[in-house]
Every structure is written in C-alpha cells, then in structure tokens.
Image: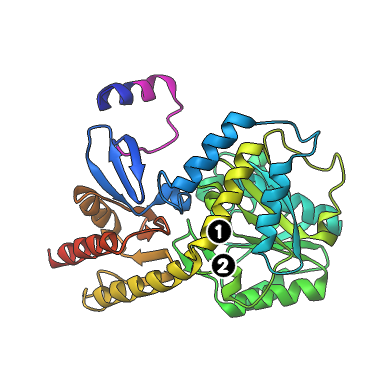
Amino acid sequence: MKLDEIKKMDQDYLFQNYARQEICFDHGEGEILWDIEGRRYIDLVAGIAVNSLGYAHPAITKAVCEQAKRLIHVSNLYLVKEQAEAAQAIVSICPPPLEDVLFVNSGAEANEAALKLAAKHTGRTRVVSALNSFHGRTAAALSATGQTKYQNGFEPLLSSAFDFVDYGDAEQLKSAVTKDTAAIILEPIQGEGGVLPAGEEFFRTARDLCDDSGALFICDEVQTGLCRTGRFFGFQHYGVVPDIITLAKALANGFPIGACVASKEVATSFQPGSHGTTFGGNPLGTVVAKTVIETMKKERLDERARNLGGRWMQDLRSFANSSNGRIKEVRGKGFMIGLEMGDEAKMLQKCAFSNGILVNVCAGKVVRLIPPLILDESSIKAFNNTVENFLAQ
C-alpha cells in the first residue's frame, strides 16, 4: 500500500486528533526504522520514550511469541502467575518501602490510580501539582496537568481539587501544602514541559512536607522511569523515596501497560472493589514487562544511559557554547536530553528528518532526544554532525 492510500484511509476512518508527519513505518531493528518506501531513519524519539530496548529486540520478540501461544488474557478474578512475577521484577529495582504493584494499561491510568489511592488513604480532598506538568489525559490526570492548553474545552469534567505551584519553587510548595492536602504529584524531569529537571532541593522539600503533613508524595516516573535518566528511576537523582510511583512507557517496550507502585501500608487502602481494570496485568503484557526489566538489568542500561548520555550532553553543550545563542540551553539527564532553541527547534527537526534522523519538539521550542537506550554511538555521531551542519548555515 502506498503512502497516499494510507493517508486517505487515515482521513476517512480515523479521528483527526493527531498532527501526524506524512511518513509510515514498516519495520525496525535496534534504533533504526524503515518506512514503507524503504527509507532508513535513526529514531531518537523511541515512540516517545517507549521503545527503550529498540525495535525487534530478540528477548522481547521471544517473550511475546512464546506467551501469545500460551495465554494472552485472563480476568483479574483469578490469580495470574505472570502478573505476580512481573510485580516481583519491578519491586526488585525499587527502594524500600515500595513493594506492592498495581498493573493498569497506560501512564494516565497509573496516575489516576495513584491519585485515587492517595485520596482513599488520607481521606483528604486536595492535591498539589506543578505548573507546566503533564500527567495524562484522563479526568484526574488531566486535572493534575499544569498546562491549560490540554484542558481547554474539558473543564466540566475536570476536578478543582488541584493547587499548582511553579515547578522547582520550594517556597511556593511550602505555602501550597495544607492539612487538606492528600498528595503532592511531581515529575522528576518535566518531559512534555520541555525537559526540565526538578532539582534536589525541590524534591527534598516535597518529601519533607509530606512527612510533616501526612500527605503522600507521588512521583510520576512514566517518562523518566526505567533507566531513561541514567538511574532506574528519576527520583534517585534527588536522594528521596516517594510513597507512590507510576510507570508506563518503557515498561513493556511498546506493549500497552502501566503500573502504580506503593508501600504495603499505602497499598492496603485499596480493597476489593476500590479500583480495578479489565486488561491491566494481563499475562502477555506482564511477561513482556518482566523481560524488559531483566534485560535492562542484564545489559546495565542505567549505566549506559548515564555514561553515554552524559558524554552526549557534553558534546551538545560544546555546540551550544559556540552557537551564538542559537542553542540557548542543553539540559536533562542520561538519555533524556533537551536542546532549547526557540523558533529554530522546528527547523532543526526538519533538517534532521531530511538527513534520516527522527527527533521530537516539545514545549514548542525544545528539541527532545529520548532514544532507545541501546543507541549505537554511530547514531549519536550522525545527529551531532547534523547539528554542526545546521549551525553552520
């Protein structure tokens, strides 16, 4: 099928709620994608930080094929061996007291569950979130998102129980927490907001405020979790442990799954009937999740992202220093890197695309690099060459 035919079918049969680029991919291997016309692309987007093991990773392919032959779905009315094994794998990389797991189908669902759990556990009515944040598009998760552009038109469905502070402002955070605060929800690095790290003081203040007030600290690790920042979790950069973390994206390398992880004390607030999901924790998804975690540990992808990503950021900062202000800042951690470029961000994205490299622009002005963690150094060099050539224009 040709691209024009696919485009017509898209327009005829699909909601037009995505601003899609006019390209359609056929297959991939490692960090490389090939479109339906056979053109090759280096993928530095990874399905928006999802395909951390790249494409056609043999361990994932084997796990999917073998489990699909056995059992794809059963109800949560029954014990699910694969679900328990995946939960054990997640807990193996979590610091205490994070030791109980609830599986869902996406990051938004994981955040919905976390917010419900905090309200149920504390019996309180308000939640503190950060401006410029992004937590998902379901009702509570969208309410917690500090960007009105995502909320416009949906106000009748949104909760008014959220108090927003400037991301990184510890003093505002102190003023926002009251006796009615059930939780603080924060991203360790704001992804959609422009690859903005929180900073240790901000996270330590959130932890201390929750300890003092009895609120719960929810860490949204949907994008930052699972080696993306050079540690298994983004909060580990700040020397704190939250009460609840949420995971999705990289957890099953493209198979839809999410997870809410909490201490046993907090988790017991959900009893039968409190919360549930039809598809969450199905055998196929959880087998893949277990395989992803095992592979990340075996291949030491946290170290790889930390070391290789750190060197990459040094290269990019050297370009920024000689760019006469065209690259305003390079920030991030590990393989979560943002180049703030203002109006030129889209121009660099277009230039990269013409050179067979896929990058993403977030917050309208930041080139976001969130590649597979198995990224080869030759692909990094190819992007660096593109940046050099772009800046020379």
**Residue 133 image label:** 1
Position of residue 12 measured from the top left corner of the image (x, y, whole percent): 39, 19
Question: Could you tell whether 381 is left or right of 93 in the image?
Answer: left
Question: Is the magenta region chiefly helix, strand or loop?
Answer: loop
Spatial CA span between label 1 and label 2? 15 Å
Helix, strand or loop for disc 1: loop
Decide whether residue 13 is among the magenta residues: yes
Residue where numbered disc 2 is placed: 234
Side of 113 relative to 28 (left or right): right
Task: Give the quarter of the image for residue 264.
Answer: bottom right
Residue 159 shows up from this direction: no
Q: Are marks 1 and 2 in contact (CB under 8 Å)?
A: no
- Dot 2, how many residues are within 10 Å of its Cα: few (below 14), some (14-19), or many (20+)? many
The C terminus: image quadrant: bottom left
Q: Which residues are magenta?
A: 9-21
Q: Is residue 276 above or below residue 13?
A: below
Rendering coords of residue 362 (x, y %): 40, 55
Please state which amino acid type lies under the numbered disc 1: Ser
Dot 2 lies on which element? helix
